[in-house]
Structures are given as structure tokens and as C-alpha cells.
Image: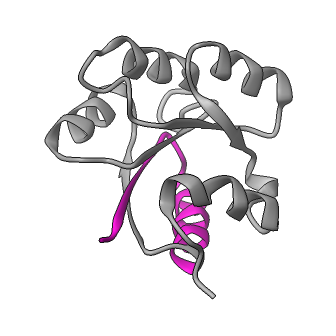
Amino acid sequence: MKKRVLDVGNCVPDHSSIKHFLGKHFDCEVMQADGAEDALAALRSGPVDLVLVNRKLDMDYSDGIEIIRQIKADADLAKVPAMLITNYDEHQQAAMEIGALRGFGKLELAKPETVAKLQPILGKAKA
């Protein structure tokens, strides 16, 4: 069964890169949300296997960690795996402290380690 990934807060070129990367390596559908309101609505509308949240949202440059905080504070959504998209370790640490899994940066999209990090959630990578 195809996995569902929600990409939150990335600009069009970055969303396209993430969608291409995930589609190349996994059997998944990638949806896009701009901010907290549409991300939470998407999560409540049907099963989502992974939420990827940009560190700074493209629409208003607000902090993506706040979206992860809202997801983890909601009893119905808290179990959905979430990752922060950032190249900065201190922000990864902050996201992990509130319940996110260690994410990755956009510079890591082409790395085999990123594919390996996503396999437990999205399943076996395509050959």
C-alpha cells in the first residue's frame, strides 16, 4: 500500500525536490501544506505515515518546530512520525526534544543515509 507523506512549509522548488526524492526511492504519495492550519486539517482528513516540516515556513517564515509541537500535543495525531527539515543540528535536537524523529537537511536529499533513515517509516526503498 502506498505510504502518505505530508510536506509542510516548503517553497515550490524545495517541495518538488522532496517529492522527486521520495518518489524515486519509495512508493509514496507526497502532499503539501503551507502552515499549521492546513497541515493539521490534512492530518485529520486521513492517514498520514510521515510529516516533514521545514524549519522556517515559506509562507511567513514562522518556526516549523511549532507545528511539530501542535502535532505532538494532539492525542489523535501525536503518534504520526514527524521530522524537521533542516541542516542545523541544534534545530534537529530541539525538534527531537518535543517528540520528532531526527530529520534531515535539504543538502542530504541525495545521500544513502537519508534513504536509510526513512526506510523504517516508508518501507523498503525501490531498487
**Residue drawn at (73%, 58%), measured in percent from left and top?**
114
Judge whether residue 92 is colored magenta: no
- Quarter of the rendering occupied by the N terminus: bottom left
Q: Residue furthest left?
A: 45
Q: Is residue 63 visible?
A: no
What coloring was used for the rendering?
A: one colour
- Camera-nearest residue between 14 and 98: 98
Query: Foreground residue, 123 or 29?
Result: 123
Q: Image quarter for residue 61?
A: top right
Q: Please give left or right for residue 8 compared with residue 84 in the image.
A: left
Q: Position of residue 81 (x, y in %)?
A: 47, 37
- Asked whether residue 86 is in view, the answer is yes
Image coordinates of residue 30 in percent, x first then y, are 40, 61
Q: Residue 94 placed where, x, y %? A: 70, 16
15 with respect to 76 (left or right): right
Q: Is residue 33 above or below residue 37?
A: below
- Residue positioned 44% across, 46% down in the render: 50
Please give the name of the residue rendered at 51% of the width and 52% of the height, measured from the top-left corner. Answer: 121
Q: Quadrant of the C terminus?
A: bottom right
